[in-house]
């Protein structure tokens, strides 16, 4: 981007929110619309053990992927991940941490679904996420205790509710029967009406799931070994009392000064939520969410993508962009090339009340899920063998003019990058080594690359497919033939110069 007239769109408007140092970072990942999702996929009520084991498998993969996660706690469709106090994961940049975690969790959920459920997805699963910082071990333990108390309260209610419904009551009658009841009343109801002792219910339902690295003296097959090693363990222990933490001080560190003052439930919501610092994107600004793939060179190599461009992979990205615009009506424009896509949200959007964390996490999760769900449609002969995951950057611009400059910057980057990779791969395919190809292209200008392609390979760069050279624009256009006003998403490969915007001025004006 050096010496580009569009350089100011990054230099003057890009912002990175760094989380405070020496704080424990908690990433809370929560299912979106999972009540409907669980009904569509016929989850058992009040608890589906397969769904819980799938969530636990995702959490285990998270600890394997991100070594700085020291503990995870999950219940129902949510999981909390605790990063160690001194972590420098992506320099503690909030958008990076939340987007990578939510995208990877979503990807693993899709990849491992078939291990637990025989049928394909009927709806796209996606998640949102929040990042909260806690200053010490005490507040981390209080946070986890709060989530476990919430697990107990919700599960006890749901166990009673579904027992009543399965006995013949309507859902409305079941809610009415439980209105105003205390914990002891629900235990009594279960025992007297259904001969169920709530304390005999599986611990995973009552206490949730804890995932951590345990110190063991066995190998993966359970055989004894001499040296202690760390193994990721899933269990369902009481996190409120001291016993678990006293026996596992290496997880968070020693915390002998942990207090529960005067019997007061310090883990109450009013206390813990004080640390939830909501950052809202500035009002009356156009928000751009740029999604880009992580470790995509490796991913494309494993899945044998064509070089320098795989048209099928690009069409898959465009399909995901179209689905994003259907999922989020406030997205007015998308632009993508290679392994990235930028989505422009309308100026007055109130999506998630402009909560940056929820916008980032829901967008990245949806895009990841769409990519996985549509993979077989575009690559029917290729098995998805590695979890694709993405990261996010956010930009806010006060004027459409600057948004257009941002998009021109990305299209310029598309041209520069594609021209270089086209030359590079033509040289490699002609027999040059990769290092030699890089040396040949070092310090060359665009005209030099065009000349190289033409003289050595009889290739006119300007005759290459527009999708490779110009990228893809996704936007809504009116369907003229429809009786009712209807706007469908169109994908085009054009220059985003003044002529384009004069013809499509409604993109910024349409509400």
Image (tube, grey):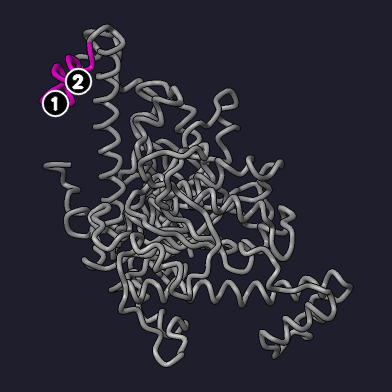
- Residue that label 2 marks: 449
Task: Please name whichever residue, 410 or 81, is drawn nearer the observer in this view of the structure.
Answer: 81
> What numbered label is drawn on residue 150?
none
**Does residue 478 appear left or right of residue 466 in this picture?**
right
65 versus 303 height, above or below: below
Mark 2 in CB contact with mark 1 (< 8 angstroms)? yes
Residue 436: within the magenta? yes
**Does residue 306 appear left or right of residue 3 in this picture?**
right
Residue 175 x %, y %: 75, 81
Magenta segment, prevailing SS (helix, strand or loop): helix
- Residue that label 1 marks: 445
350 versus 360 height, above or below: below
Q: Residue at point 30% right, 62% down? A: 396
Dividing the image into 4 quarters, which one contains the N terminus?
top left
Residue 212 x %, y %: 43, 55
Q: Residue at point 26% right, 38% down? A: 413
459 versus 16 height, above or below: above
Q: Which residues are magenta?
A: 433-447
**Does residue 51 appear left or right of residue 25 in this picture?**
right
Q: Residue at point 33% right, 64% down? A: 252
């Amino acid at each position: 981007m050096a010496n580009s007239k569009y350089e100011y769109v990054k230099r003057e408007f890009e912002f990175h929110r760094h989380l405070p140092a020496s704080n424990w970072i908690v990433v809370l990942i929560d299912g979106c619309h999972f009540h409907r999702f669980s009904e569509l996929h016929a989850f058992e009520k009040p608890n589906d053990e397969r769904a819980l084991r799938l969530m636990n498998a995702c959490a285990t993969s998270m600890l394997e992927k991100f070594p700085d996660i020291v503990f995870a706690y999950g219940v129902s469709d949510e999981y909390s991940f605790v990063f160690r106090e001194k972590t420098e994961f992506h320099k503690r940049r909030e958008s990076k941490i939340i987007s990578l975690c939510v995208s990877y969790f979503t990807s693993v959920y899709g990849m491992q679904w078939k291990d637990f459920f025989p049928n394909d997805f009927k709806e796209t699963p996606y998640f949102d996420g929040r990042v909260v910082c806690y200053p010490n071990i005490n507040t981390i333990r209080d946070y986890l205790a709060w989530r476990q108390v919430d697990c107990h309260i919700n599960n006890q209610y749901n166990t009673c509710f579904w027992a009543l419904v399965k006995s013949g009551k309507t859902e409305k009658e079941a809610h009415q029967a439980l209105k105003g009841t205390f914990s002891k009343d629900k235990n009594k109801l279960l025992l007297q009406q259904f001969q169920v002792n709530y304390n005999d219910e599986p611990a995973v339902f009552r206490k949730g799931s804890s995932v951590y690295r345990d110190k063991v003296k066995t190998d993966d097959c359970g055989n004894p070994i001499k040296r202690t090693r760390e193994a990721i363990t899933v269990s369902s222990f009481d996190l409120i009392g001291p016993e678990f933490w006293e026996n596992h001080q290496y997880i968070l560190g020693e915390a002998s000064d942990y207090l529960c003052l005067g019997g007061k439930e310090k883990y109450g919501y009013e206390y813990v939520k004080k640390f939830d610092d909501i950052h809202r994107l500035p009002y009356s600004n156009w928000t751009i969410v740029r999604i880009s793939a992580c470790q995509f060179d490796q991913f494309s190599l494993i899945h044998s993508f064509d070089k320098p461009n795989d048209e099928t992979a690009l069409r898959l990205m465009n399909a995901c962009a179209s689905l994003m615009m259907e999922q989020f009506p406030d997205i007015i424009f998308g632009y993508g090339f290679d392994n990235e896509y930028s989505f422009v949200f309308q100026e007055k959007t109130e999506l998630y009340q402009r909560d940056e964390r929820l916008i980032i996490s829901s967008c990245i999760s949806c895009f990841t899920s769409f990519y996985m769900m549509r993979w077989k449609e575009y690559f029917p002969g290729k098995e998805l063998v590695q979890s694709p995951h993405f990261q996010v950057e956010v930009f806010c611009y006060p004027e459409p003019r600057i948004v257009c400059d941002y998009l021109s910057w990305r299209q310029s980057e598309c041209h520069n990058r594609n021209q270089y990779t086209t030359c590079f791969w033509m040289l490699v395919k002609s027999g040059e080594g990769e290092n030699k190809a890089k040396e040949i292209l070092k310090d060359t200008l665009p005209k030099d690359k065009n000349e190289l392609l033409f003289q050595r390979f009889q290739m006119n760069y300007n005759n290459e497919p527009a999708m490779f050279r110009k990228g893809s624009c996704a936007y809504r256009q009116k369907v003229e033939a429809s009786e009712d006003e209807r706007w469908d998403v169109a994908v085009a490969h054009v220059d985003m110069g003044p002529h384009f915007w004069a013809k499509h001025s409604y993109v910024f004006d349409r509400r």
